[in-house]
Image (cartoon, rainbow, N blue to C red):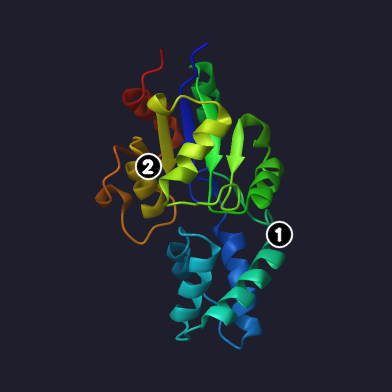
């Protein structure tokens, strides 16, 4: 039997609004180090390339450079604290559940490819009530490579049992778009996620402003049958 078409989603800024909890954890680290907290409105665009990049960007925004050893220590502290506060304020973006329903009804398999750790991704999606919708949830530690390495995406597709020739990536950042392009897979970008450059300027195949537009965008790029 032929493998089904597959839609692979980023998590932070794509499926879920997680900025409050991510920046909340960053601010815990900043205050521990004697620095001022960053307002969410300013720090939201710092998200998008994983926790290590967020820490580096956050400390640089406060005028402090961090060396490799300190960076690792802060990263360990970040992961420990964030793991206890995954869904204090995080929630699905409007229309996510309905969009997943429509894709599944059209025969799509669903998966997640994120630079969060796999365990925290599974837990968060469980708390948000949609973990069981995905054939695979693959994080930065699932494979030896992580985004923007295309093998993170192609490995996710393989693990989910999808057809790589009928796959699409859905994301919100340069990292997602670059990953999909490197893998030779079309990409739909959402406008409401975490990016310091408008996604329309990063060369995605389609741009959507709401999940109600996802089905049309995906089916225009991927052959269903």
Q: Is residue 135 left or right of residue 152?
A: right
List x then y, in percent, for residue 3: 50, 19
Q: Residue furthest bottom?
A: 34
List x then y, in percent, for residue 41: 47, 66
Question: What is the crowding at mark 1: few (fewer than 14 residues within 10 Å), some, or many (at least 20)?
Answer: some
As measured in the structure, the alpha-carbon distance from the residue carrying label 1 to the one carrying label 2 is: 28 Å
Numbered marks: total:
2
Q: Is residue 172 visible?
A: no
Q: In terms of sequence position, does the residue under pointer 1 or pointer 2 come before the other?
A: 1
Question: What is the crowding at mark 2: few (fewer than 14 residues within 10 Å), some, or many (at least 20)?
Answer: many
Identity of the residue drawn at 60% across and 35% down? 136
Name the one closer to the observer, 166 or 149. Answer: 149
For numbered disc 1, what is the local secondary structure? Answer: loop
The picture quadrant where one finds residue 122 is: top right
Location of the C terminus (image quadrant): top left
Q: Which mark is residue 98?
A: none
List x then y, in percent, for residue 192: 42, 49
Figure check: 18 above or below 220: below
Identity of the residue drawn at 30% across and 42% down? 204
Figure check: 11 above or below 32: above
Identity of the residue drawn at 32% across and 50% down? 199
Identity of the residue drawn at 46% across and 73% down? 57
The picture quadrant where one finds residue 83 is: bottom right
The answer to whether mark 1 and mark 2 are in CB contact below 8 A is no
List x then y, in percent, for residue 92: 58, 43
Which circle, 1 or 2, is nearer the viewer?
2
Q: Is residue 200 visible?
A: yes
Say which residue label 1 marks. 83
Say which residue label 2 marks. 180
For numbered disc 2, what is the local secondary structure? Answer: helix
């Amino acid at each position: 039997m032929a493998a089904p078409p597959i839609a692979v989603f980023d998590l932070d800024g794509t499926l879920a609004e997680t900025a409050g909890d991510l920046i909340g954890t960053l601010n815990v680290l900043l205050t521990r180090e004697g620095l001022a907290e960053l307002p969410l409105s300013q720090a939201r665009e710092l998200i998008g390339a994983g926790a290590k990049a967020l820490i580096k960007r956050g400390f640089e925004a406060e005028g402090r450079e961090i060396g490799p050893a300190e960076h690792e220590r802060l990263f360990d502290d970040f992961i420990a604290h964030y793991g206890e506060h995954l869904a204090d304020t995080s929630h699905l973006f409007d229309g996510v559940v309905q969009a997943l329903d429509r894709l599944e009804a059209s025969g799509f398999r669903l998966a997640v490819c994120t630079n969060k750790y796999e365990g925290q991704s599974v837990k968060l999606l469980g708390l948000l009530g949609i973990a069981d919708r995905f054939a695979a949830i693959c994080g930065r530690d699932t494979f030896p490579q992580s985004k923007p390495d295309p093998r993170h995406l192609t490995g996710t597709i393989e693990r989910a049992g999808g057809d790589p020739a009928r796959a699409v990536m859905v994301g919100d950042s340069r990292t997602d778009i670059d990953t999909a392009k490197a893998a030779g897979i079309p990409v739909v970008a959402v406008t409401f996620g975490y990016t310091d450059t408008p996604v329309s300027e990063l060369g995605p195949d389609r741009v959507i402003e709401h999940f109600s537009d996802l089905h049309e965008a995906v089916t225009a790029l991927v052959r269903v049958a």
